[in-house]
Amino acid sequence: SVTGVQTCALPISTDLPKVEVTDAAGEGREARINGSTRIRRETIDALPVLDRDFTGLAGLDPLTGAQLSVGGQRWTSTDIRIDGAQARNMLRAGEANGGPQAIPLDAVREFEVNTGLFDAGIGRSGGGQIVVATRSGTNTPTARAFLSFRNQELAGATDFQARPRSARRSSFVQSGVSWGGPLVRDRVHLFLAYERQHSSEPIVTGDVSTTAAQLAAGIA
């Protein structure tokens, strides 16, 4: 038998050439510009939103009607997605949540209403679609807090039934706080948002506090 050994020396170099990777942006969602309306974070901060519910932003799309109906379709056919996950109430339509809103408005990074030209991966919607992308932290720490208060003193002196403020006491308090920043710079980021809404408002179904009102209602 013949045995041979060959020794090779491999040089180690620490001078690595610079590698640049470039690419042109594809069409992406821009191709749906005629069939969608997008609202970015800067615009959301500048807009008054009723009850701070993100679905209120859908009214900025010209094809959105009452009760979140899109493009003339039934409002129960409007799909709602948060970060790609379906968040539609399958029983009564609208967003699936047990409170005033599904997520805090401060947590919304981008809002989009799709009225047509859906992606192939979008289904379970016979009408339009409302899409929300949530925020994430960045290397720059940010924080925000707010408080909103309203009671009967900020309403008219009398209502449509000529009742004074003392007969329709109410209060509405809405507060929230959010924080975002790095846990490990350039690697791990965190964003937290919390909102609370407390309201106490009378609901009048009929005024029978006086004899005249009782006679008019046929109960006296």
Image: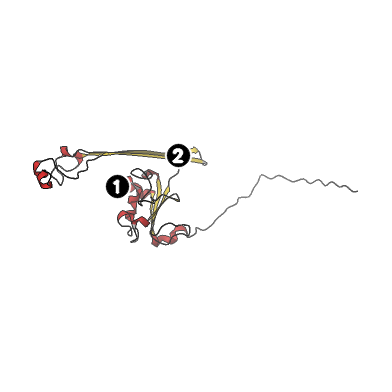
Q: Secondary structure at mark 1?
A: helix
Residue 70 position in % (x across, y down): 35, 58
| Relative depth, front residue between 210 and 137 | 210
- Give the tally of numbered discs: 2
Mark 2 burial class by Cα count in 10 Å: few <14, some 14-19, many 20+: some
Q: Residue furthest left?
A: 212
Contact? badges 2 and 1 (CB < 8 Å): no
Residue 218 position in % (x across, y down): 12, 47
In this figure, which residue is indicated by the disc labeled 2? 181
Residue in view at x 34 percent, y 56 percent: 75
Residue in view at x 39 percent, y 62 percent: 34
Q: Amino acid at mark 1?
A: Leu
Q: Is residue 50 visible?
A: yes
Q: Is residue 164 left or right of residue 120?
A: left
Q: Is residue 148 visible?
A: no
| Relative depth, front residue between 101 and 31 | 101
Q: Amino acid at mark 2?
A: Gly
In this figure, which residue is indicated by the disc labeled 1? 50
* Disc with the residue nearer the chain's start (2 vs 1): 1
| Relative depth, front residue between 152 and 10 | 152
Residue in view at x 40 percent, y 44 percent: 107
* Quarter residue 154 falls in: top left
Residue in view at x 33 percent, y 54 percent: 68
